[in-house]
Image (tube, helix red, strand yellow):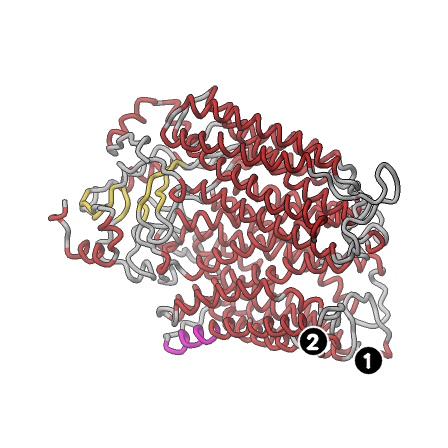
Amino acid sequence: MAEKHTEEEKTLLARNPALARRRVQTDRRELDEAADGRELARTWAKVHGLYGWLTNTEHKVIATRYIVTAFIFFLLGGVEAALMRMQLARPESHILNPDFYNQIFTMHGTTMMFLFAVPIMEGMGLYLVPLMIGTRNVAFPRMNAYGYFTFLIGGIFLYTGFFLHVGPDTGWFSYVPLAGPGYAPGKRVDIWAQMITFTEIAALVGAVEIVVTVFKQRAVGMSLNRVPLFVWAQVITAFMIIFAMPAVMLASSFLASDRLIDTHFFNPAEGGDALLYQHVFWFFGHPEVYIIFIPALGFVSAIIVAFARRKIFGYTAMVLALIATAFLGFGLWVHHMFATPLPQLGQSFFTGASMMIAIPSGVQIFCWLATLWGGKLRLKTPLLFVLGFVAIFVLGGLTGVMLASVPLDLQIHDTYFVVAHLHYVLIGGAVFPLFGAFYYWMPKFTGRMLSERAGRWNFWLMFVGFNLVFFPMHQLGLKGMTRRIYTYLPQTGWGDLNLTASVGALVLTAGVAVFIFNFLWARRRGEVAGDNPWHADGLEWATTSPPPDYNFAYLPVVQGRYALWEAKEDAPVVVGLKTDCREVLVTTVLDAEPGHVYQLPGPSIWPFALALATAVAFTFGIFTPYAFAVGAVCAFAAFAGWFFSNPNSENAEAKAATPKETTTKRERTGRIAVEGEA
Amino acid sequence: MSAPRNVIDVSDMPHHTFDVGEPVWWGNWGLLAIETTMFGILVATYFYLRQNYQLWPPPLTSSPQPFDSLPDLTAATANVFVLLLSCVPMILADRAARRGDRRTVQIALVLCLAFGVAAMVLRGYEFRAVKFRWDANAYGSIVWFTLGMHAAHLLTVTLEAFLLTLWVFLRKFDMKHRVDITVVAVYWYWVAAVWLPLYAMLYFVPRFG
């Protein structure tokens, strides 16, 4: 068929020699898109009702659940923050008692870190990555459902404890000995430790999901040097999760076993070591910051490219900077422990490493500025949030460089200066880009535009509110106000700054409220978005808004780094995937050449069953170690059920009604059974 | 019907390949990367706690054998050989699955299960050969924890192989499950391989470290 190649196709083959090498032939064919779409819609259709809810394995549904659930936790964490600001608004306040205040700040930190930030970033990834790389679902759809259920159960478990007045009260990092068996009797810390296990399982599942999906299911032609920066950010984050989360699983398991079965990991009287906990926890805890922050960098790159209307400046430098940040992120954990007796050489090493992180961050900031500089800016809400991010994040980065130096850190350790710094980094570095991302991708998610006017109110309220809350905290910290105190005396002179911060909290809350109203309004009355309202470059904009269950009628073929901007007039599409079962194309890791076609499994109840078995082990595990044995048996039963279950890949309805039709369909697409040829 | 479009037809592509071609092979390596990190941190924890002791393990102060607190080598060393030997039938199953030889796969997997059970029984003796319970001191805690985490993997991989054995006896010898056998083989080799440094650490650091 080579003689039939048009000029365009010849260019395509020349630019991607891999295609020619594998003799992937392009062909011309008349396609009945409407009929194929109907068939695909039937095959990928959702099951309705409660059973359908429990068995769904579609990535967009699971991801939406992650995003919505995590956003609800964000609101709960926000209410806790508001309660703290109420309490601290004036000296000697008694709205909250000390014990409740301890629970509140612990719940706030725990919720924001484990139940909001990580899951919502992964949720955005699980929604957008398959669309951006042009495939129909993630690589392991059922594991994906399992991950969500464990996350949900973990969150419910933590809040059940809190509402029963057994909320954890030892801070979001639960240092021993305070959190150990000697000083924290009762079940509070146990609930915290097991919640960690649930959420980390979910994070790890999601991470493997994203890595494998991106490695193996990219659109034909999307070689690694054409992968969108957002997808790079998600993959790098996933790798960080894979290497960081095991540490916190161990930290929380050691803690739980010290409390439950009397091991002595952290008990100095029997050769254990309290500092060991800090090491193991922060070996996770520092990379965690980047796990939250790197996906946000992906949002920023995507938004800047779309609104500056030009290609990113320094793509390779950007990718390398992300990877460098991820590597360096594992060498910084000790800077959280400068106030502990460490060897001086170690302190200097970690100071150096902490300051080094400014280099890749700086590279990225300059690349973005260079992109914006030459671009024709459209100052829409997503870009406003990104500019807000740059301003806030640079301030947070500067205080970070300050905190990296040991003498200064010793003075302001555990003061409000640190609180200010971490909120500048995390809210500035993650929440602002996240809201920008909401405005940017909400048209894709819902099919309707959020209001631009409300968006501006939203941004300015949040920007002003944020700075009102957290800027005074720098000074409060320098004036000696320590973290986690439930009240203070009037003579300290902290009252005015605290009142300012509390007023700021109101403004910030108003900003979030505007977003919620904007969202609810837009769901019904927002302007209909169309496929690509921003004229952006990513493949996610090549399909309808919201995307159909099967994402693309024909999987796209990518001809450049900016898929839609660089697509040739008559770009080829992939045909020949069966429409009567959930088939996807598997491509090679580096060059994304077609490798084989692969049937993904469909809906199943077993992921939910396995999540329940996990829940048996870890919830009842706070009362008796035998729960782990029972849970393991249940898990094996669920796993066996899963293993022997029907893949449900085919369209059940069509299979039952007209078994003949399936065969003809196969003949029509010319499928040859070549299973043996590996 | 619309105008003709350029298409790439993938309908005659194979349904499965092995190793780097297969998503599940990558997924399995994801799990193993997670668990290798976990064992790496356990090793770091072991040496971190080691610093708190003059004598590692601390001397026993009571009968049966006062002062000799070294973990017994017999069961552990036997287990090294069992785990290494267990790889032989797994390699056979792995290769037979690739060429589609069902009979060899069946025999080899049953042999693997026997080795897996033997390794778990020996692991039971290994726990008894540690002279301290998990709640005696930090030494006992970390040794029990490490042995236990490895035992959990031993159990998991054996159960996984058990399910696949059931499948090749009861169901079709289809391509998907042939790929699964080669993937579980990777996990199996990993469980055996990761034991070697752990064995060296748990049994020889107390003797020479």
Say left or right for B110 vs A278.
left
Mark 2: few/some/many CA within 10 Å (<14, 14-19, 20+): some
Mark closer to the chain start, 1 or 2? 2
Q: Residue at x 69, y 47 (%)?
A: A195
What segment carries the magenta color? A365-374
Say which chain tag 2 marks.
A
Rendered location of residue B104, percent (x, y): 43, 24
Quick check: do tags 1 and 2 share a chain? Answer: yes
Q: Nearer the viewer, residue B72 or A524?
A: B72
Rendered location of residue B110, percent (x, y): 52, 24
Say if the magenta span includes residue B85.
no
Q: Nearer the viewer, residue B88 or A346?
A: B88
Rendered location of residue A183, percent (x, y): 85, 54
Task: Find residue A406 and name its label.
Answer: 2
The amino acid on which the numbered mark 2 sits, given as a three-letter code, is: Val
Q: Residue at x 14, y 53 (%)?
A: A6
Rendered location of residue B53, percent (x, y): 79, 55
Say left or right for B113 vs A196.
left
Q: Quadrant of residue A11?
A: bottom left
Task: Find residue A332 and name its label.
Answer: none
The amino acid on which the numbered mark 1 sits, given as a three-letter code, is: Gly
Mark 1: few/some/many CA within 10 Å (<14, 14-19, 20+): some
Label 1 or label 2, whichever lies nearer to me, is: 2
